[in-house]
Amino acid sequence: MFVVTVLFEIEADHVEDFRAAVMRQAENSVSREPDCHRFDVSEDGADPAKFFLYEIYTDEPAFQTHLKSDHYADFNEKTTPWVKNKAGVRLESVLHIPAHDM
């Protein structure tokens, strides 16, 4: 599996807008892309302007397909002006131990 993490820091006056857009992006990615297996959105409890994404794809080509999707292009175009900082990491998963349902 191919893992992508992204840490966003958002301009303070666009936090709510970004939250809504990234939630929609997560839902679109999982529902429209059969090779997107997970798309978690987390927020920093101490700093509401920081968001962390954890995404899992079948492989790197599946992630490239994600980057070419219409919904990603729309998300990226809409949110880029709101982003103060963005740091991404791409990894290959070496171990996955399924947890019990929460």
Image: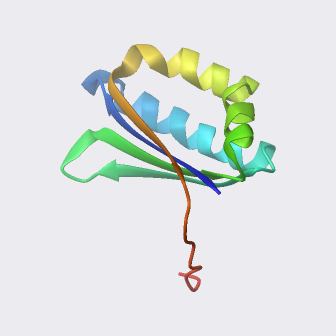
* Residue 61: % across, % down: 73, 38
Q: How many marks?
A: 0
Who's the residue at 61% across and 39% down the image?
24
Most extreme residue toward the bottom is: 100
Who's the residue at 59% across and 25% down the image?
75
Give the left or right position of residue 96, taking residue 89 as reference.
Answer: right
Asked where in the image residue 38 lies, by quadrant, the reply is bottom right
Give the left or right position of residue 5, taking residue 69 as reference.
Answer: left
Who's the residue at 36% across and 24% down the image?
14
Looking at the image, is 94 positioned above or below residue 100?
above
* Residue 68: % across, % down: 72, 24
* Residue 47: % across, % down: 21, 43
* Residue 76: % across, % down: 56, 21
Colour option used:
rainbow
> Which quadrant is home to the N terminus?
bottom right
Asked where in the image residue 96 lies, by quadrant, the reply is bottom right
Give the left or right position of residue 50, taking residue 27 as reference.
Answer: left
Asked where in the image residue 64 lies, by quadrant, the reply is top right
Most extreme residue toward the left is: 46
Looking at the image, is 2 positioned above or below residue 6?
below
Who's the residue at 29% across and 23% down the image?
11
Looking at the image, is 99 positioned above or below residue 94?
below
